[in-house]
Image (cartoon, helix red, strand yellow):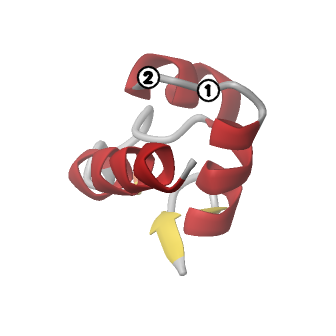
Amino acid sequence: MYVCICHAVTDKKINQAVNEGVQTMRELRSCLGVGSQCGKCICHAQQVLQEAHQVK
Ligand code: FES
């Protein structure tokens, strides 16, 4: 499922980024661009990021 439409980032991509060492929203933004355009995805992206850390 798409989390960030502007940058075509899916929840899978976020999970993958977490597995590669991404810890924070800031890192996620600099590596995938999530939230750097319209900003509408930030809330959802944060949630996915948190869940990915819990699963890890
Ligand atoms: Fe992510 Fe617009 S949907 S920046």
Q: Secondary structure at mark 1?
A: loop
Figure check: 24 above or below 17: above
Residue on which the image places disc 1: 22
Ligand 1 lies under 8 Å from the Cβ of mark 1: no
Instruction: List x then y, in percent, for residue 13.
Output: 69, 57
Instruction: List x then y, in percent, for residue 17.
Output: 70, 40
Q: Secondary structure at mark 2?
A: loop
Q: CA distance from mark 2 to mark 1?
A: 6 Å
Instruction: List x then y, in percent, for residue 21.
Output: 69, 25
User: Disc 2 vs disc 1: Cβ atoms closer than 8 Å?
Assistant: yes
Please give the name of the residue rendered at 56% of the width and 65% of the height, measured from the top-left corner: 11
Quarter of the image that includes the N terminus = bottom right
Please give the name of the residue rendered at 55% of the width and 30% of the height, measured from the top-left corner: 28
Please give the name of the residue rendered at 72% of the width and 41% of the height, measured from the top-left corner: 19
User: Residue 41 appears in which quarter of the rendering?
Assistant: bottom left
Type of amino acid at the residue the image marks with label 1? Val
Crowding at mark 1 (Cα within 10 Å: few <14, some 14-19, many 20+): some
Figure check: 21 above or below 48: above
Crowding at mark 2 (Cα within 10 Å: few <14, some 14-19, many 20+): few
Q: Which mark is residue 24?
A: 2
Instruction: List x then y, in percent, for residue 26.
Output: 44, 18
Type of amino acid at the residue the image marks with label 2? Thr
